[in-house]
Amino acid sequence: MSLTPFTSEIITAMHIAIVIVIGVRVIMLRPVPGIALAWLLLVAVLPLFGLVLYLSFGERRIGQSRARRMAAQRADFDILKKEFFRESMTAVDWSTHPPMSQQMDRLGRNKRESPTLAGNKLMLYSDTQQILEAIATDVDRAKNSVQMAFYIWHEGGRADKVLEAIICAAQRGVRCRLLIDHLGAASWWRGKQPERLREAGVELQPALKVGLLRGLVTRNDLRLHRKIVTIDGQIGWTGSMNLVDPRFFKQDAGVGEWIDAMVRIEGIAVLALGATLIGDWLLETGEDTLQVVESANLHSVRHAGTADVQVIPSGPGESSDAILQMLLGLIYGAQRELVLTTPYFVPDEAILRALRGAAGRGTDVDLIVPAEVDSTLVRYASRSYYDDLMEAGVRIRLFHGGLLHTKSITVDGEVSMIGTANIDMRSLWLNYELSLFVYDADFTQQLRALQATYLEECETIDYEVWINRSYIQRFVENTFRLASPLL
């Protein structure tokens, strides 16, 4: 059936209106020129489809309501900083560190208002069963408060021991708050454990709820990817591990057990972990800031060791590119050796160039990634970057001992990073993450020793063999690479 002239004019007008509105929006937001041109072309050729895609994935939209709550929360925390932060907390002796450490500190202060905190005791855990046991033990000893934020919670195995410890803590009067991502733990939310926790008196809150109506004002794929535990304002945990027992988690994915690392913290950095978690909790609940802070017992934080730690939260509405800039700072600061582990490697152009530059100036660069990951899209997109890296001298190590989920970087055996952020576009731009930048040689050498154990189970990709892989394989990899911003 042919269209009437009037109908054709209406469709043409709508087409032009969509192109103009989205075009102006893209231009004023100033994304990378290549990305901007891609959106403009898509909307011009397929206006309705392009409009839907752009509204879904084109911007880091957090919604006006959440943006207002974030602004109000920053004002509240600025007031609380004067009460909680003391000058001694940031009294770092930079003469004991390599020059890049103080430069990283300045970068974190400028990008995220996150100073390096002195006086911390760090314990690195790499055995997942020991991690769950240790967290449960800490919860069993809690006297005042237990706070947790996780992307995934999955029942089974020793993860249930942590759950039982939380229930017991709540029943003996400990204030327990759990913030669990709505989508990441979707199957857990449908189970019986959430109700058991609530019946015991645990305050349980889903983070970043998803839904069709919410998708009209905010992106549904923004996720709380942080893993944080604070207990009595004195003990903190963070790292790569979700609240799962790997022996019971994703056993049908064909990638082996997940391999993780966590850091147990005592000292001033617990204050920064607790403040980050409280901020996330308040954004979801709208509760009174002062009451939540007081009940978390953060005023009891004390110096506990000698490690200097900078806690960098990142995510839409919190920072523009803080975690990206900090990672670039580490890579550019490396002189002798740079070792990175990440389960999902889909870098942006800046990180790709920085890694190539590090290898080009003579730094030994090892990138350790799992041989198999639980995402087909990521698996092929990641491989499309190997050619350029290996050509520059970066060694690509494929880990065969399971799905290596640890996110870590060590630089010259002196400075390190460990946390929740992958080296992929999702962690850099879309997820709410938390990373520890540690200016302490002892801890860094412990982390480097852990990386060495990973290397023992790695196969190094042969560059000459790799560049001779089939044209079809390279075409598939490069095709999936086009979806990098969504991975």
Image: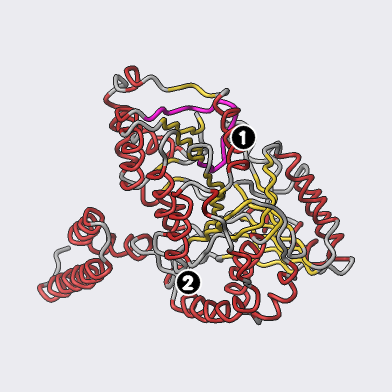
Which part of the image, by quadrant, shows the N terminus?
bottom left
**Mark 1 = which residue?**
252
| Secondary element type, mark 2 | loop
Instruction: Give the CA separation, mark 2 to mark 1.
Output: 33 Å
- Quarter of the image where one finds residue 301: bottom right
Task: Tell me where residue 281 appears, x and y as whole percent.
Answer: 63, 70
Q: Is residue 339 above or below residue 178?
A: above
Rendered view: 376 above or below 37: above
Residue located 34% across and 40% down the image: 480
Question: Position of 177 compared to 110: left or right?
Answer: right
| Magenta span | 394-409
Tag 1, which secondary structure? loop
Residue 75 in magenta stretch? no
- Numbered circle sitting on residue 197: none
Which residue occupies the extreme right position in the image? 172
Q: Residue at x 63, y 42 (%)?
A: 261
Q: Quadrant of residue 404?
A: top right
Pointer 2 or 1: first along the chain = 2
* Residue 213 image label: 2
